[in-house]
């Protein structure tokens, strides 16, 4: 009986010391590639900005923050929206103030662009609800095995 108590104590201590951190790390290593795979790509800048920013806590409670450093663009790609120019100009023929044009290299001149939402974060979150349990369980199983369990 004493050996069992000793084994369970070692397992408890190992899980309390490293369990949540290792599980979160394993989940992040699974989550970020999936997130990047779902992220809409034009220049890849949004994908490149998605990463683990911070990890806080320890023992049985750890939080990891995964974010993008292009939050306005990420929100626009997720939810969609309208782009209109901020500037106006005076029409030389009529003297009226008019809304300016949107333009970019190689692109058309227009006064309005509507972007449909891609819902890539929603798709990734739906996938993660079940898929992240496996890497977390594998990390905990490894800690238990390393503790002698």
Image (cartoon, rainbow, N blue to C red):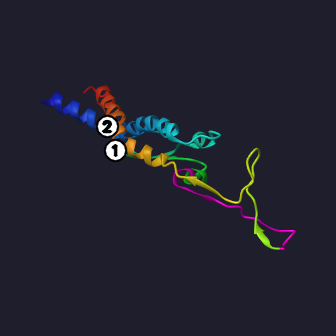
Question: Are dots 1 and 2 in contact, CB under 8 Å?
Answer: yes
Name the residue carrying label 1: 60
Residue positioned 75% across, 49% down in the render: 104
Q: Can you say whether 100 is above or below 45 in the image? A: below
Q: Can you say whether 86 is above or below 124 in the image? A: below
Is 74 placed left or right of 9 in the picture? right
In the image shown, does 91 or 12 lie closer to the viewer?
A: 91
Name the residue carrying label 2: 15
Question: Which numbered disc, 1 or 2, marks the residue that appears first in the sequence?
Answer: 2
Is 87 placed left or right of 147 in the picture? right
Is 99 placed left or right of 19 in the picture? right
Q: Can you say whether 145 is above or below 69 in the image? A: above
> What's drawn in magenta, residue-wise?
77-95
- Give yes or no for residue 88 being in the magenta stretch: yes
Residue positioned 30% across, 37% down in the render: 13
Location of residue 56 in the rendering, given as x and y in whole percent from the top left corner:
45, 47
Which quarter of the image is occupied by the N terminus? Answer: top left
Find residue 52 and name its label.
Answer: none
In the image shown, does 62 or 66 lie closer to the viewer?
A: 66
Q: Can residue 148 be seen in this view?
A: yes
Crowd band around label 2 with a 10 angstrom C-alpha radius: few (<14), some (14–19), many (20+): many
Which quarter of the image is occupied by the C terminus? Answer: top left
Location of residue 110 in the rendering, given as x and y in whole percent from the top left corner:
72, 56
Quarter holding residue 20: top left
Location of residue 112 in the rendering, given as x and y in whole percent from the top left corner:
67, 59
Residue positioned 17% across, 28% down in the render: 3
User: Which residue sits furthest front?
Assistant: 93
């Amino acid at each position: 009986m004493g050996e069992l108590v000793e084994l369970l104590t070692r397992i408890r201590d190992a899980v309390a010391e490293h369990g949540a951190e290792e599980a979160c790390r394993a989940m992040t290593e699974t989550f970020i590639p999936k997130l990047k795979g779902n992220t809409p790509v034009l220049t890849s800048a949004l994908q490149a900005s998605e990463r683990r920013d911070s990890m806080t806590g320890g023992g049985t409670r750890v939080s990891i923050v995964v974010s993008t450093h292009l939050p306005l663009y990420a929100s626009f790609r997720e939810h969609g929206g309208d782009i209109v120019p901020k500037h106006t100009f005076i029409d030389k023929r009529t003297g009226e103030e008019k809304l300016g044009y949107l333009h970019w290299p190689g692109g058309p001149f227009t006064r309005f662009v509507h972007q449909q939402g891609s819902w890539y974060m929603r798709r990734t979150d739906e996938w993660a609800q079940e898929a992240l349990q496996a890497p977390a369980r594998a990390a905990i199983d490894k800690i238990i095995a390393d503790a002698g369990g």
